[in-house]
Image: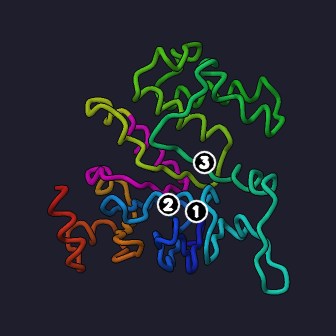
Amino acid sequence: MSEAIRLRGIHKQFSGNPVLKGIDLDIAAGSVTVILGPSGSGKSTLLRCINHLEKLDGGTVHVGDTLIGYQRKDQTLHELPEKRVAEQRQRIGMVFQQFNLFPHRTVLQNIVDAPLRIRGQKRAEVQARAMALLEQVGLAHRAQAWPRELSGGQQQRVAIARALAMQPEVMLFDEPTSALDPELVGEVLQVMKQLAHSGITMVVVTHEIGFAREVADNIVFMDQGQVVEAGDARRLLDNPQHPRLREFLASVL
């Protein structure tokens, strides 16, 4: 199976404090990878490095065959202009903890905005695809609603549809249920489970162990900026080898 994402030697620090300490990771195309770990372990930072929302202090990120955020000249990496990075990001959908919908635009307008403005696609085609995505996330009947009229779970489902509207190769989820009331978590996870069976590559930072057990192909456990243990999801959840992962699972299960 080919690699959708390849990380090599990823280093990142904030104000001199190392947050990522040489991460190497391969994520197969079409797989679902769940990143687990305690708060402050570097999970979200690693996710943001994949689409260059955080600039690297060392290492490289490839999505497919494309080097993200940089170009190589004479064995030296040079940062790409922001416009080029923005073009690369079109291949990488991302869903954040906060929904970040445009409050002054309807649900449908939120979804069609980027394909129309950035891709210049035909409005009829974009709207048809947007409605199909809203159907997929169970919100076709709220296409003309304003974000303020939706629950948090509904807003997050719209955010997922908006990310999918750009037809990305990879979907990144940064703790997509952490800002939701507990009774709304299930509806978002259900959409993500359906998406996991669609064949798109997914990388999910979450504390939802049940979701990981049900749909993840692989688990990556991080602690203190390093990958402590990684591998087959069932094996790691049922029989973790590293004591730090055993301790973490005991605390969240």
Q: Report crowding for label 3: few under 14, some 14 to 19, many 20 or more residues within 10 A (C-alpha).
A: many
| Residue lying furthest bottom | 75
Counting from the top left corner in percent of width and height, residue 67 is at 72, 70
Q: Nearer the viewer, residue 207 or 236?
A: 207
Q: How far apart are labels 3 and 2 at the CA level?
A: 16 Å
Asked which quadrant contains residue 132, the reply is top right
Q: Residue at x 52, y 66 (%)?
A: 15
Question: Residue, x 41% and y 27% (percent of image)?
Answer: 152
Label pair 1/2, CB-CB below 8 angstroms:
yes
Q: Nearer the viewer's eye, disc 3 or disc 2?
A: 2
Residue plotted at (61% across, 73% down): 57
Label 3 sits on what residue type?
A: Gly
Tell me the residue that label 2 is attached to. Answer: 45
Comparing marks 3 and 1, which lies closer to the viewer? 1
The boundaries of the magenta stretch are: 188-211
| Secondary structure beneath label 1 | helix
Mark 2 element type = helix
Q: Which residue is mark 1?
A: 49
Left or right of residue 28, residue 152 in this image: left
Disc 1 from disc 2: Cα separation: 6 Å
Where does label 3 land, which residue? 93
